[in-house]
Amino acid sequence: MKNEQPTAGKPGETSQWPRWEGPEESRPSGYLQGDANIFTDESEQENHAGQAPADYDRSDELIAQDIKEQLTKDAFIDPTAISVSVTNGEVLLEGVVTKSDDKERAEACAMSVHGARSCINNVRIAPRASLTGAQA
């Protein structure tokens, strides 16, 4: 089976493979979440997932927790030397990574979390040898 990405269209079409439209708890691994509402006749329905009500204000602790979860889930960053703090929605990233891409990716993870208003990225870039010496 070749590795394909699902295409736009109504759920249930063969072009939607490998999306799963059933309950989350019974979804087989490898299936993606469907983006369309199967109960509408509109062909161009906007996806509003991730949008919050106007008066929804998240706590700094919850924002920091979600950022840490995002960093943990990212397969391309080693976040073990990164610390996260949030004050009034402003994110502060500190620590050390080995590549500039990791620094940029950490900031992107932080800003992808709802409630993060800005990010101060004080993550430094150092060779791997410096990281092991600093942790010892």
Image (cartoon, rainbow, N blue to C red):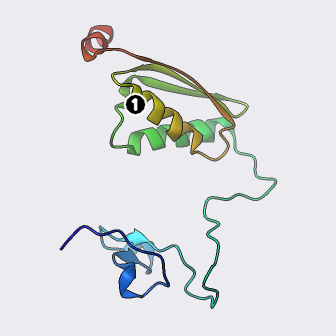
In which quadrant of the rendered view does residue 63 lie?
Answer: top right
Percent across and percent down for residue 62 are 61, 41
Percent across and percent down for residue 8 are 47, 76
Percent across and percent down for residue 77 are 36, 35
Using the image as rendered, state which of residue 38 and residue 1 is in the foreground: 1
In the rendered image of this protein, does residue 126 appear above or below residue 2? Answer: above
The amino acid marked with disc number 1 is Asp
Q: Which residue is mark 1?
A: 102
Given the current orientation, which residue lies at the most extreme left position? 1
Left or right: residue 133 compared with residue 108: left
* Position of the C terminus by quadrant: top left
* Position of the N terminus by quadrant: bottom left
In which quadrant of the rendered view does residue 7 lie?
Answer: bottom left
In which quadrant of the rendered view does residue 111 lie?
Answer: top right
Left or right: residue 3 compared with residue 7: left
Q: Residues within 10 Å of mark 1 (few under 14, many from 20)?
A: some
In the rendered image of this protein, does residue 104 appear above or below residue 38? Answer: above
Using the image as rendered, state which of residue 6 and residue 109 is in the foreground: 6
Percent across and percent down for residue 103 are 44, 28
| Element at label 1 | helix
Given the current orientation, which residue lies at the most extreme right position? 55
What's the residue at 44%, 38% (across, down)? 71
In the rendered image of this protein, does residue 18 appear above or below residue 108? Answer: below
What's the residue at 61%, 69% (across, down)? 47
Left or right: residue 77 compared with residue 43: left
What's the residue at 34%, 31% (across, down)? 78
What's the residue at 36%, 27% (across, down)? 80
Q: Count the labels in the image.
A: 1
